[in-house]
Amino acid sequence: MAVVAVQCPACGGQEVVRYGRQANGEQRYRCKNVDCERRIFLARYHNTGRLPEVKQQIVDMALNGSGIRATARVLGVSPMTVMSTLKKKRRRFTR
Ligand SMILES: [Zn+2]
């Protein structure tokens, strides 16, 4: 069985299976967590590092003393995303 490196955006579960495609060709996934509120989602929703709310959360966690790795793990983004987000913010703050 192929490992799908996709997390459910609703519950964070990694028990996720491919579930066909949208009419526009986007890959859909289904969460196997029976308690999950969302169940079916698109792969692009997984790219949460680009969403403004997540960037705000990254900054908030940094201000609360969370490390880059911990922040990345909790928010489900890559450490690179955390670092680049904080760098951009810091530039804005110090100007
Ligand atoms: Zn889920």
Image (cartoon, grey):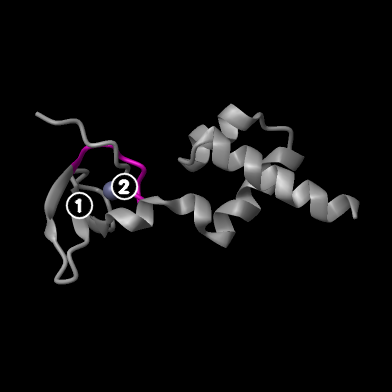
Residue under the image location 50 percent in, 37 percent down:
78
Left or right: 92 in relation to 36: right
Amino acid type shown at disc 2: Cys
**58 up-or-down from 5: above or below:** below
94 drawn magenta? no
Residue tagged 2? 8
Q: Mark 2 packing: few (<14 Cα in 10 Å), some, or many (20+)?
A: many
Circle nearer the viewer, 1 or 2:
1
Left or right position of 20 against 64: left
* Residue shown at 56% from the left, 53% from the top: 54
Q: In the picture, residue 2 is in which quadrant? A: top left
Residue closer to the observer: 21 or 41: 21
Residue 19, percent across and down? Answer: 12, 53
From the viewer's side, name the closer residue of 39 and 24. Answer: 24
For the magenta stretch, what is the residue range?
A: 9-16
Q: Position of residue 76 (x, y in %)?
A: 45, 40
Q: CA distance from mark 1 to mark 2?
A: 8 Å
Amino acid found under the numbered disc labelled 1 = Tyr
